[in-house]
Amino acid sequence: MDFRSDNTAAIHPLVLESLSQVNQGNTASYGVDEQSKQLSKTLKKLFDQDLSFVLTSTGTAANCISLRTICPGHGAILTTSEAHLNNDEGQAPELLLSGAKLRTFSNAQKKLDLVQAQAWVNKALAMKPHAGKACAVSITQSTEWGDVYSLQELRDIREFCDRNSLLLHIDGARLTNALVSQNLTAAEFVKIARPDILSFGLTKNGALMAETVILFNPNFDDQLAYAHKQVGQLMSKTRFFAAQFLTMLTDGLWRDLATTANDQTAKLANIFNEAGLELVQKPKTNQVFAKLPEQTAKKLQDGGVLFYPWQDDIYRFVTSWMTTDDEINNLKKIL
């Protein structure tokens, strides 16, 4: 009964099979292989617009390359205090952004607080050049607390960026779960949010190592290519990375797997509710945060349930494409 993370799940069999299928003979490398060429067409069709992309091995690399592409060393990135960028990247942004600084503004829902952010932008402009130059906004969809930015919130953030001449980065490590939750296609999402650059990950969705930086703003094509190489993420055998994306994005496999993960979290939330345990919020994706008495948490752990202590008496449970009803029912029996 492993609810620690969707990262603990196995690779989907079709993804594993795709790696074997492309492991035949010699082929071109560094992104000019046939799989990478096909992926370019597939991504353009998925998002229904022109774009450029680079493949990376980790979400950390994808996020840092994204921001290195669009933000200079004297710039500031506006994000939330809960952001993966701020908490879980081992200070990779500080290392790789050449001096660019993260500024955090969170509201009660642990989303970007535009009022606070606007006040800081105004103050920074008044202090020019003593304060950093606001250059970008970075949000996570779905959020680190399993929530999603609503369509109106996405529009408001884009309007905030346009009003202040800021670029928009979206960390989409669990974007698939958010799209399923909101019943959106990828194309509909980018038409609403209008990101300049997107970190799009399928590793948590059932792949082995499938992360990409997708650039929608053509003004930064050169910057993306050089940042990708400089950070050490221009991998040679790109066919193996591209093959994973092609498998996941063909015939909607990504959506099927994200739907399963979201549905299993909804079942888990119902069990906690029936047991009289408080949830931090109604889960919208594949993460649920429950307040557990210490003895309840220990009882679950002693019963073989794996989950993640979050903060204070809050614990995180994450489901994946391979979470079974038996696992959830066994947890219920222990409760």
Image: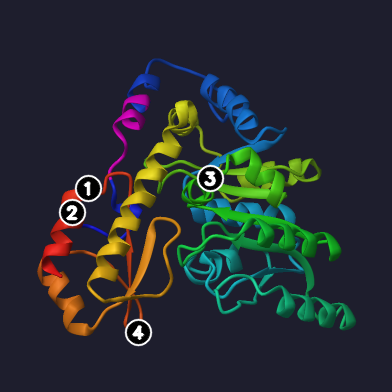
286 and 60: which is toward the camera:
286
Distance CA(mark 4)–CA(mark 2) = 25 Å
Marks 4/3 in contact by CB < 8 Å: the verdict is no
SS state under label 4: loop
Examine the rendered structure and indicate whether residue 108 appears above or below residue 136: below
Q: Nearer the viewer, residue 274 or 181?
A: 274
> Residue 153's x, y, as percent?
67, 62
Tell me the CA gap for discs 2 and 1.
5 Å
Distance Cα–Cα, label 3 vs label 2: 27 Å
Instruction: Give the magenta-colored segment's residue range.
Output: 10-18
Identity, as a three-letter code, of the amino acid under mark 1: Thr
Query: Is tag 4's residue or tag 2's residue first in the polypeptide sequence?
Result: 4
Is mark 1 in CB contact (under 8 Å) with mark 4? Answer: no
- Nearer the observer, disc 3 or disc 2? 3
Instruction: Give the residue at mark 2.
Output: 327
Q: Position of residue 67 (x, y in %)?
A: 66, 57
